[in-house]
Image (tube, grey):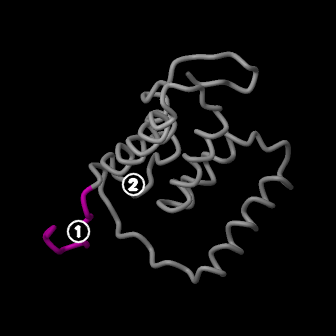
Amino acid sequence: MVVKKDNRREPFDRAKIVSGLKKACEKRPVSMETIEQIADRIEAAVAEQGGREVLSSVIGSAIMNELHRVDQVAYVRFASVYRSFKDIDEFMHELEDLIRLRKEAGAAPAAPARDKKGEPASRKGEPAS
């Protein structure tokens, strides 16, 4: 069971995880396979609780951690909804933290471009490999 912020309880629903990930990753170079793998890891972590209740905030944080590693734009999209920023200052603070963490870790190389199906995109005039 998932314990919501208002203390309501509802069964864990993997489809909600996938739906939230798809919205955050819309028009981003994140394949459906990657989204499914993230959902699998989160579902497994919930299952490890052994049927006990898990706070929705724990699930939300796990999604944010996964997105932070996969696609930072998707991470910011999800965070903006999940954290319900009250104003632009809170949003900017989150972006500043993200930039700081990126600088500390050394900017990772950009992920290769992907087409709508999540396949590597070919360069103009070159066949897809």
Q: Residue furthest front?
A: 50
User: Few, some or many C-alpha atoms within 10 Å of disc 2 (few <14, some 14-19, many ≥20)?
Assistant: many
**Going 55% across and 80% down the picture, which residue do you hit?**
107
Badge 1 marks a residue whose secondary structure is: loop
**What kind of residue is marked 1?**
Ser
Q: Position of residue 52 (x, y in %)?
A: 56, 26
Q: Which mark is residue 52?
A: none
How would you rate the neighbour count of disc 1 (Cα within 10 Å): few for under 14, some for 14-19, many for 20 or more? few
In the rendered structure, which disc, 2 or 1, sits on the residue that comes first in sequence? 2
Q: Nearer the viewer, mark 2 or mark 1?
A: 2
Stretch of the chain drawn in magenta:
119-129
Q: Secondary structure at mark 2?
A: loop
Q: Nearer the viewer, residue 116 or 6?
A: 6
Q: Where is 33 relative to 44, above or below?
A: below
Q: Position of residue 128 (x, y in %)?
A: 16, 67
Q: CA distance from mark 2 to mark 1?
A: 16 Å
- The residue at the point 83 percent across, 52 percent down is 88
Vertical comparison of 125 with 43: above or below: below
Look at the magenta stretch and give its main secondary structure: loop
Q: Is residue 105 above or below residue 60?
A: below
Amino acid residing under circle 2: Val
**Quadrant of the image containing the C terminus:** bottom left
Where residue 105 appears, x then y in whole percent? 60, 79
Q: Marks 1 and 2: in contact by CB < 8 Å?
A: no
Is residue 118 rendered to the left or right of residue 30? left
Residue 122: image tag: 1
Residue 22: x, y in percent?
Answer: 45, 40
What residue sits right under mark 2 in the picture?
Answer: 30
Residue 125 sits inside the magenta stretch: yes
Residue at the spot 63% in from the left edge and 17% down from the top edge = 9
Which quarter shows the N terminus?
top right
